[in-house]
Image (cartoon, helix red, strand yellow):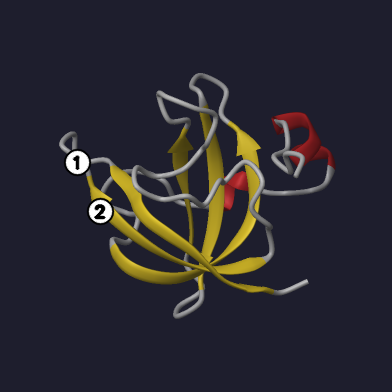
Amino acid sequence: MDSNVMTWIQAEDLGYERGVYIWRPGTVPTGNLDVILDFKMWAKNAFAINCYFQCIEDGLKFSLQVYRRRRGILYSPPGCELDFKTCPVQSVYRIEVANDGKNLPRIIRAELVKILN
């Protein structure tokens, strides 16, 4: 499957508003979350994908980065085979978010629950 990750310009041209998604440490929820993956963009300064989620429970919008594994070509959390480079947007995911050693929120587990469109 081809990548469905947008560039910043493509996302802007399509009207996506990344500024309404929180991302700062301490503001992003942690724990097990059911979310909709709204859209994805290539990160500007890292081998990563910026994923923009909406929490199903309360509608909170937040973003998290998923980094490319050091070995291989998957953009996924360690131990997870879900590749965020090709996974469908506008779909429901169950993710687990925890703070890493630098107190930054990271996805540590992810699974596709349901494709919405």
Extreme left residue here?
101
From the viewer's side, name the closer residue of 40 and 113: 113
Identify which residue is drawn at 80% across, 36% down: 10
Identify which residue is drawn at 25% across, 53% down: 98
| Picture layout, residue 39 above or below residue 68 | below
Q: Position of residue 12 (x, y in %)?
A: 76, 39
Identify which residue is drawn at 66% across, 46% down: 86
- Left or right of 37: which side holds 26? left
Image quadrant in which you'd find residue 112: bottom right
From the viewer's side, name the closer residue of 85 and 41: 85
Q: Which of marks 1 and 2 is in front?
A: 2
Q: Which amino acid does label 2 sit on?
A: Ala
- Left or right of 58: which side holds 109? left
- Left or right of 18: which side holds 13? right
Q: What residue type is labelled 1?
A: Asn
Q: Residues within 10 Å of mark 1 (few under 14, many from 20)?
A: few
| Picture layout, residue 20 above or below residue 104 | below
Q: Quadrant of the C terminus?
A: bottom right
Identify which residue is drawn at 50% across, 68% down: 35
Q: Quadrant of the N terminus?
A: top right
Q: Where is residue 42 in the image (x, y as percent from the top left)?
A: 62, 31
Q: Name the residue under label 2.
A: 98
Q: Where is residue 20 in the image (x, y as percent from the top left)?
A: 56, 53
Determine which of the numbered discs, if any, sits on residue 103 in the image: 1
Q: How crowded is mark 2: few (under 14 residues within 10 Å), some or many (20 or more)?
A: some
